[in-house]
Image: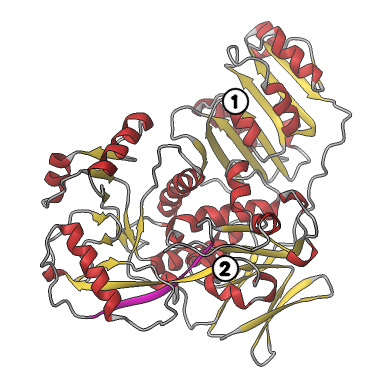
Amino acid sequence: MDYREVWRGRERCTVLDAAHDEERLKVLVDVWRTDPLRSPHLHIIALCEHLMPGMHRMPQAEPGLTVDLVNAPIDAALAQLAARVDLFRLRGLEQAGDGFARAVARLASGDARLVAQGLTPAQIAALETQGFVFDAADPSQGTGANVRCARFASRKPRPPRPPAPERRAIVLGAGIAGSAACERLCARGWQVTLVERHEAPAMEASGNRAGIFMPLLSRDDNIPTRLTRAAYLFALRHWGKLGGIGKAIEGQACGVLQLARDADHAAVQRAIAQEGGYPADFAEWLEQAQAEALLGLPAPDGGWLFRQGGWARPGSVCEALLAACGRRVEQRFGVGNVRIERVDEREWQVRDAAGQLIAHAPNLILANGAGAAAIPQAARLPLTAMRGQVSHVPADMLPALPVVLCREAYLTPASHGLCSAGATYDLDPDPALSPASHAENLARLRGLLSDPHAAEGAPLQGRVGFRSIAPDRLPLVGRLPDFDAAGSTERLRDVPRHPGLYTLLGYASRGLIWAGLGAELLAAQIEGEPLPLEMPLVDALDPARFVLRARRNPRGPQSIDV
């Protein structure tokens, strides 16, 4: 098959490869790159066993090229993809049965092509039943009758391709969520106006001296674990493109040691280590002797070592993201409190307290954390502003740490003569430093160090920020639901939405990790691209989930345990 026939005339061409092979991928990309009539965007999704479970969006230097690698059996992978595929390349499926045929048809665009090697007669028959019409064997492929080509000719109606959006947007909030949104949209050629009430980016929850980046583990590999793993790995790759930790981004990829709480907790963690089979550079369980040798301090129950983890100053991540936007982003800082309104069903306008127009565009992204509660369209989202106080402790009052140390709290290695310890989690609305919160942080610090006298007399210094948290502690990524118009809606896809209004909210204490992939997901949704996460995760992040939960629970969302 001449692949150029597939992508010519398309704005975007999506290829699904059932068996990832670097050489095959390179050949395909080279053909696309050298075709003057190629589609502007080539999106390759390939099944790959040699990486962590789940979906992995791999940053590419080539403009217009996107590569997703998926580690899952073909039936599970196809069932969870959100994509419209123009070309299927199927091979290595002799032992896969024929159940994948229905999922292939579900993903196929109206005129999709298929090239397959080594399919069984039963698999070919199953694909024919789903609407694929096979050509005769193609000897030019070099494997004779083992290679078969087909066209998708089903008469079942296919959902229309979404129209290309007008690539202009306003992003409200210049913290980590808003900065990531700007960068991901600008990378796709958008013009973005960034609106921030403060005089500079990262002045709210993203303004801490240090944020911790590390994965989350669980025995059942639940949704928070899967989301955090995907986001963590995406962040590491993406930060590398921005210049890297310790270079463009202030921080240290020094590793994180997460201590077990007690012997019972350690036993559960050992079981996770045995069952998970994680690569050592991702997560390694250390017993007491190993942990203490690394740390130089007591670690009686052992702990997890995340070698690629560490700490970064969130503000420096914001700065690197905005620098990558270049001239595509217009920054409007110091505007104070704002209000939004929809005008003529065409665009959103943002005005300051005096009514002066600050920005207008067809698309508006709310990435302003706790400030979203003041936006009428978002006021019914069940978000809580949780106070977090971090204590800054003089480094000479503490032992030198080779890694970030954490358990219920965290302690960073020294930076500019200070270590960050914290953070508290409470509903107190007071933004001032609290002696009680400082004492709480020092008590937890002493527990981490197994030293009841550590940091005695440490001065009251630090920072208070307010995290935006949903009841299920998952972020809200997607188009904002219209609560008033929802009626008796029972399914996410049927929930009415505000046109052109989106959210990147509820990042809690994981915004440093979640922000990049959240912004990538939202940008892909707006553009109608294949999504970078499995559909169960996409649905779990949809802000409209709270419309359905409010119907099932008329009492409304319950309070968050702290």
Tag 2 residue: 367
Position of residue 40 measured from the top left corner of the image (x, y, whole percent)? 68, 46
Which amino acid type is marked by label 1? Ile
Which amino acid type is marked by label 2? Ala
Where on the picture, by quarter, is residue 119?
top right
469 within the magenta span? yes
For mark 2, does the 10 Å Cα neighbourhood hold few (<14), some (14 to 19), or many (20 or more) residues? many
Quadrant (top left, top right, bottom left, bottom right) of the N terminus: top right
Residue range (magenta): 460-470
Looking at the picture, tell me which residue is in the foreground, 433 or 67.
433
Q: Secondary structure at mark 2?
A: loop
Looking at the picture, tell me which residue is in the foreground, 460 or 419.
460
Where on the picture, by quarter, is residue 337?
bottom right
- Toward the bottom, the furthest residue is 354
Question: Which mark is drawn over residue 149?
Answer: none
Position of residue 81 measured from the top left corner of the image (x, y, whole percent)? 64, 37
362 within the magenta span? no
Looking at the picture, tell me which residue is in the foreground, 414 or 542.
542
Question: Which mark is drawn over residue 74?
Answer: 1
Asked if the residues shown at circle 2 and circle 1 are in contact, with their CB atoms under 8 angstroms apart, the answer is no
Asked if residue 31 lies left or right of residue 347, the reply is left
- Toward the front, the furthest residue is 555
Position of residue 132 measured from the top left corner of the image (x, y, whole percent)? 79, 21
Say if 182 sits above or below 80 in the image.
below
Where on the picture, by quarter, is residue 265?
top left
